[in-house]
Each structure stands twice: as C-alpha cells, then as structure tokens.
Amino acid sequence: MGSDILEGQTCIVTGSSRGIGEGIATELGAHGAKVAVNYRSSEREAHETVDDIEDAGGTAIAAQGDVADYDQVEAMCEEVRDAFGPVDVLVNNAGITIDKTFGDMTREDWDRVISVNLGGVFNCTHCLFDDLQAADDGRLINISSVVGQQGNYGQANYATTKSGLFGFTRTIALEMARSGSTANCVAPGFVATDMLEEVPERVQQKILDRVPLDRFATVDDVSGIVRFLASEESSYMTGQILGVNGGMEW
Ligand code: NAP
C-alpha cells in the first residue's frame, strides 16, 4: 500500500480493465481511494484489476457499462454510489481507435470513435456532475493524447476526439470552479499498451525518432500524474493540459 492521500475518495476510472486505465485504478487504490473499475466487455481482466487492488490492501469493485450508452452509464454510477457513496473523482480514460486514412474512413468509423471517446466523456461527466461539484475535492480528469495536439496520420477521428477534450476540460473547469472542484486533462505521448500494439512496427520506429527521451511512456509515467491530479496537492490547478510525452513538440 502506498500513502493514504486519497483516503475516503470514491473514484471511477472508465476503461480500467487493462492498459493505462488499469494502471490508474491500481495507483489510486494503492493510495487509499475506493475504486470502481469500469469496463465494457473485458470482465475477467476487470476482476483481475480489482483483485490486484485488493491484494495490495485497497478497496475496489468492477463496474460494467459501455460509456457510449447513457442508460448503462447511469446504472453503473448508481451501482458505484450504492457501494461506496457519492463519487469524488472521475477519470475519463476509456477510448478506442479505428485507424484509416481519411479517404477510406467511413461515417461509421467516425461515429463509433466519437461516440466512445467524446460521447462517453459526456455521459460519464453528465451523470456525475452533481457528485463532483458536491465533493470536497471533486476531480475530473480526462485522458487525451499528444495526437490531439499534433494530429496523426490515419487518425482523423481519434485526433478530433482527443483535441475535443481540451475545449471540454477548459469549459467544465470554468463551470465547476465555483464549487472548488477541478477539471484537468492529461495528454500522454505513445504508451506501451494494447493500443500501441496495433500500430505497425515501422510506424512505431518513426514515432520513437520524434521522442527526445527515446522511449515510449510506461503506464506508470501516466498513472503517477493522474494520482497527483486526483489529490489535494493539485487543488489550485484547473483547466490545464499536462503533457506526458517524453518531450515531443506540439
Ligand atoms: P487499451 O489498452 O485499448 O484499453 C482500453 C480500455 O478501455 C479497456 O479497458 C476497454 O475495456 C475500455 N473500453 C473501450 N471501450 C469502452 C467502452 N465503450 N466503455 C467502457 N470501456 C471501454 O487502451 P489504452 O492504451 O490503455 O488507452 C487508454 C486511454 O489512453 C484512451 O483514452 C487512449 O486514447 C489514451 N491514450 C493512449 C495512448 C497509448 O499510446 N496507448 C496514448 C495517449 C492516450 P473493454 O475491453 O472491456 O472494452
């Protein structure tokens, strides 16, 4: 178990059955938070994440719900409140890619990525907006990407969603400020997860050539920043974008 800086905080991390979300959920759990591990279909992996948190002395539940579906998100939030009480910290992490050059991209490819990466953020934030504002240290943390800053070949749909989070975060930060709660955005560079596995090796090498620190990010590089944003230590930061990208220019 790490420190107890998040003791008493109820956190939902969307898409935390694996990858960056799993790392964030584990990190928040290790610092005393009660964590809801949201997933859409990876039930076994979500339960493994819960087991890992509990094995380390933390408290967690698995919470199924497709973030793109408002009714499912509402039900998932209710389940979490029943288990842990009102939600203090929402990490909008769930995200997907359907990569194609724009000429080959169908309207369906576009809509699906928008509905998960932006629609999901709307649904979760909307369902938890009152909780976050009523919390002593309410925290909204949106996981964007350096791709939202730079654009990326073959990712017009994904890049659009990730830049959209900047305007969303800034606006929600203004609207929540009265309550003392904060909204911030983390924009990781390229992180070694299943999502990166889908990128051809030749393209991975091209990306690495643009990273001054000459390595991909680890999940821990991102989860530590999210833990900081979730904690009281960041209470005077809001509406910000934190780049965790090995020094890439944008
Ligand atoms: P990942 O390994 O593909 O994991 C995605 C997670 O999201 C899984 O737990 C998945 O669970 C969940 N998920 C997907 N669609 C969902 C939905 N509709 N409802 C609920 N959960 C859903 O992805 P990752 O690399 O960890 O990426 C996590 C976030 O970081 C994303 O927002 C991504 O854009 C961002 N990011 C990633 C990188 C990178 O290089 N990997 C860089 C910058 C930013 P199920 O399997 O159950 O669907």
Image (cartoon, helix red, strand yellow):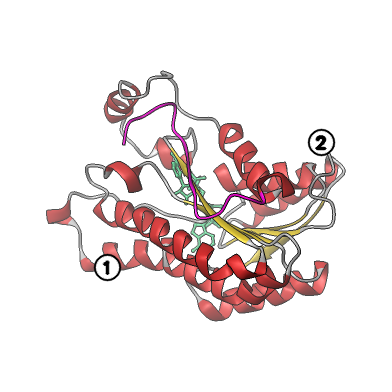
**Magenta-colored segment: predominant secondary structure:** loop
Residue 227, x across and y down, in percent: 67, 43
Q: Does residue 191 lie above or below 79 as drawn?
A: above
Q: Which of 55 and 161 is in front in this view?
A: 161
Q: In this view, does 29 lie to the left or right of 70?
A: right
| Res 92 seen here | no
Name the amino acid type tagged 1.
Glu
User: Please, is residue 77 above or below residue 109 in the view?
Assistant: below
> Residue 243 colored magenta?
yes
The x, y position of residue 11, in whole percent, is: 71, 58
Q: What segment carries the magenta color?
A: 235-250
Q: In this figure, which residue is indicated by the disc labeled 1?
A: 108
> Which image quadrant: the C terminus?
top left
Q: Mark 2 or mark 1, which has the lower sequence index?
A: 2
Label 2 is placed on what type of residue? Gly
Q: Residue at x 65, y 78 (%)?
A: 75
Whether residue 209 is visible, yes or no, is yes
* Circle nearer the viewer, 2 or 1: 2
Residue at x 30% of width, y 20% of height: 209
Camera-side residue: 98 or 247? 247
Where's residue 174, x and y in %?
Answer: 51, 66
Q: In this view, does 250 lie above or below 49?
A: above
Quadrant assignment, res 150:
top left
Q: Mark 2 highlights which residue?
A: 2
Return the residue found at the far right: 57
Please state which of residues 198 and 22 is positioned toward the viewer in this rendering.
Answer: 22
Examine the structure image and report whether residue 198 is included in the region drawn in magenta.
Answer: no
